[in-house]
Image (cartoon, rainbow, N blue to C red):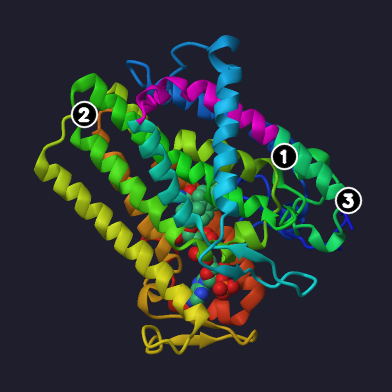
Amino acid sequence: MPRGPGDDRAPGRGGGDGLVSEGSCGADARRDRPRSPGAAALMLLLPATMFHLLLVARSGPARLLGPPPYLPGPEALWSPQMLLLWFTWLGLQAALYLLPARKVAEGQELKDKSRLRYPINGFQALVLTALLVGLAVSAGLPLGALPEMLLPLAFAATLTAFIFSLLLYLKALVAPASALAPGGNSGNPIYDFFLGRELNPRIWSFDFKYFCELRPGLIGWVLINLALLMQEAELRGSPSLAMWLVNGFQLLYVGDALWHEEAVLTTMDITHDGFGFMLAFGDLAWVPFTYSLQAQFLLHHPQPLGLPMASVICLINAVGYYIFRGANSQKNTFRKNPSDPRVAGLETIPTATGRQLLVSGWWGVVRHPNYLGDLIMALAWSLPCGVSHLLPYFYLLYFTSLLVHREARDEQQCLRKYGLAWHEYCRRVPYRILPYVY
Ligand SMILES: NC(=O)C1=CN([C@@H]2O[C@H](COP(=O)(O)OP(=O)(O)OC[C@H]3O[C@@H](n4cnc5c(N)ncnc54)[C@H](OP(=O)(O)O)[C@@H]3O)[C@@H](O)[C@H]2O)C=CC1
Ligand SMILES: CC(C)CCC[C@@H](C)[C@H]1CC=C2C3=C(CC[C@@]21C)[C@@]1(C)CC[C@H](O)C[C@@H]1CC3
């Protein structure tokens, strides 16, 4: 049953990383009230920020906080060829998604006690895309020209996100109540369009949210990075060390996400949040066009980077990755099989649900060690761009606020799920992300 704005019977959590839905510790009444002005503002602000970043990255002064160097006219944004290119990309990724998978995984249990099945072939899609792009480049495809097309491509992606979210909203009108997400069904159309109504919208076995979260955006991000590297090589004879580092670090991150694709099935994006504008825009436009900002900046603002500094930055990325991967793998291994010898010796807290909480190992250092590792890596991605500009640090700033908000949402859910046991965990592990600081 869709909820009315004042109806407090239905599940009381909004969702999403879009910061409109709920306060971390706010009163329930405040949390449950849909905030359509906030949702509407974000629907304008997020694309505007993305275009601002794209424009500023290529401008001489590259000032994050200054005005954009110019306002692009419709001809700079709208291009039927770029729209076609964008749809070709989506079509290619959809075709790769449909190829036979090495494994089919089951998702979390749904309201109606069923479980959906998901193909685990994201890494295969990355490798096949790399092979196809490699073949196309050797046959003469000018990949180095892609950076000049970022504005119209980002516009095509934004347009797609709006239209796609509208179709998802309409599809949810005929979906059974059990298919709806706990947030995003307030009855306020703007708010619900933004957060997304249906939890796992699908046509046959094609799962739109799972597909979008891991394929076109993430793989598109590393492809844009590669194109920027190639254009730098064309312009300056060879890619800079800074560009190599940014490409290498981010490829490792994307490769890791696709290699551990199954882990995404337990994230709140898949298990809790509806699929609406926020995730559609985030996955399709925000990730490829803003996460590639450091490489965009480097193309237009070459930075000298010596080997000693590059080694320090590599070490920072390695430490971040070690924590990120160690923490994620420890939790995933424990959740799959608590008797696995790699985690069997860890100290745990029992909970009333029958599940246990790790209280030693990485999860005994802080309550979100994986976020800590992720943030350390984010720093390592910005450092090759030097310290003369704030722009390359945008990702670190945005990501810090995203993870702080996400951490607050997750803690609320865990408190709900585990009650007293979660209080005990918080007592034993008092810091959230950064030991002795936060
Ligand atoms: N680059 C990007 O833009 C983004 C990256 N990320 C990354 O994605 C990854 C996934 O993040 P996210 O989905 O937010 O959540 P997490 O992987 O941190 O999972 C949180 C869940 O872990 C379980 N958990 C928490 N504490 C413990 C414990 N002590 N012992 C055992 N289980 C515990 C709980 O679920 P339960 O008990 O039900 O198992 C909790 O809900 C992270 O590495 C994050 O950094 C996330 C968002 C954006
Ligand atoms: C546009 C908004 C401000 C926010 C949009 C948020 C999305 C971009 C992110 C929400 C959760 C994400 C996750 C990942 C990418 C970013 C989004 C989609 C990962 C796939 C990144 C790689 C990690 O290994 C797993 C992440 C899961 C969550």
Cα distance, mark 3 to mark 1?
15 Å
Left or right of residue 264, residue 325 in this image: left
Determine whether the beta carbon of the residue marked 1 sits less than 8 angstroms from the nearest atom of ligand 2: no
Which kind of residue does numbered mark 2 sit on? Gln
Residue 435, can we see it? no
Per the rendered image, the range of residues in magenta is 139-162
Above or below, 385 relative to 151: below
Residue 24 % position (x, y): 60, 57
Tell me where residue 84 appears, x and y as whole percent.
Answer: 59, 26
Q: Main secondary structure of the magenta part?
A: helix
Q: Nearer the viewer, residue 287 or 182?
A: 287
Q: Quadrant of the N terminus?
A: bottom right
Q: Is residue 343 part of the magenta span, yes or no? A: no
| Residue 347 falls in image quadrant | bottom left
Q: Where is residue 88 shown, x and y percent of the image?
A: 57, 33
Residue 147 falls inside the magenta stretch: yes
12 or 224, which is in the foreground? 224
Looking at the picture, which amino acid does disc 3 mark?
Val
Foreground tag (1 vs 2): 1
For mark 2, what is the residue?
A: 303
Give the residue at mark 3: 174
Q: Nearer the N terminus, badge 3 or badge 1?
A: 1
